[in-house]
Image (cartoon, grey):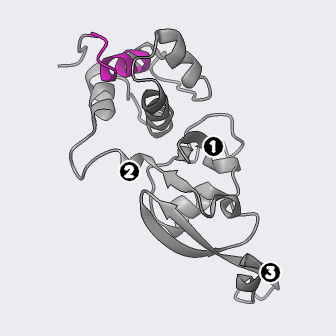
Amino acid sequence: MLENRSRMNFADGKTSRTRLLEITVNGEAHEITAKPRVMLLEVIRDKIGLTGTKDGCESGTCGACTVLLDGKPTLSCITLAVECEGKTIRTVEDLADGDNLNYLQEAFLDQGGTQCGFCTPGMLMSATSLLEKNPKPTRQDINKALEGNLCRCTGYNSIVDAVMQASGQGVKTKMQ
């Protein structure tokens, strides 16, 4: 079916193959054209316009670009967009309800787990996946779930405390 939707793109003066992709991001269907080697991160940020997912390392080492692909934390900077057709993609923009943050986002604020905020979208998405599978994780579970997300500001304790708070495990608010 996709073979029939491939076409030649001469806009840049060169012959290059593009594909028409139908992807669903945060419950909304999008029809976009992309070259076969375009990464999901580029599609999310540049074609769909959702800039919450961050472009950190472009090599899959920092986790700032983490999205949920069929519920699984996925590094969008090393995932081809063409591999995502027919799959459910969730970005950090899907967590809040308008201006109302969800319980995990609130916990990150309460615990001071945001600092500069660059890693926060990826941390939130990895933690969301964990809490959806394991509503009462241990600190060890949280550390394991977040091991692919790097943060240079917080030292991780406040982030782990935020996930513990979000899971209702009695962590007191640090920030007032």
Within the magenta stretch, is there residue 165?
yes
- Residue located 35% across and 21% down the image: 162
- Disc 1 to disc 3: CB gap under 8 Å: no
| Mark 1 crowdedness (10 Å alpha carbons): few <14, some 14-19, many ≥20 | many
Say above or below: 128 vs 2.
above
Q: Quadrant of the image for the N terminus?
A: bottom right
- Closer to the observer: label 1 or label 3? 1
Q: Amino acid at mark 1?
A: Leu
Q: Which mark is residue 16?
A: 3
- For residue 82, which quarter of the picture? bottom right
Separation of marks 3 and 2 at Cα, in angstroms? 32 Å
Residue 176, percent across and down? Answer: 17, 19
- Closer to the observer: label 3 or label 2? 2
Instruction: Looking at the picture, tell me which residue is in the foreground, 10 or 23.
Output: 23
Say above or below: 69 vs 61.
below
Closer to the N terminus: mark 2 or mark 1? 1
Closer to the N terminus: mark 1 or mark 3? 3
Q: Which residues are magenta?
A: 159-171
Q: Which mark is residue 75?
A: 1
Separation of marks 2 and 1 at Cα, in angstroms? 16 Å
| Mark 3 crowdedness (10 Å alpha carbons): few <14, some 14-19, many ≥20 | few
Separation of marks 1 and 3 at Cα, in angstroms? 26 Å
Q: Amino acid at mark 2?
A: Glu
- Disc 2 to disc 1: CB gap under 8 Å: no
Q: Secondary structure at mark 3?
A: strand
Q: Secondary structure at mark 1?
A: strand
Q: Amino acid at mark 3?
A: Ser
Closer to the N terminus: mark 3 or mark 2? 3
Q: What residue did someone put label 2 on?
A: 93
- Residue located 57% across and 40% down the image: 72
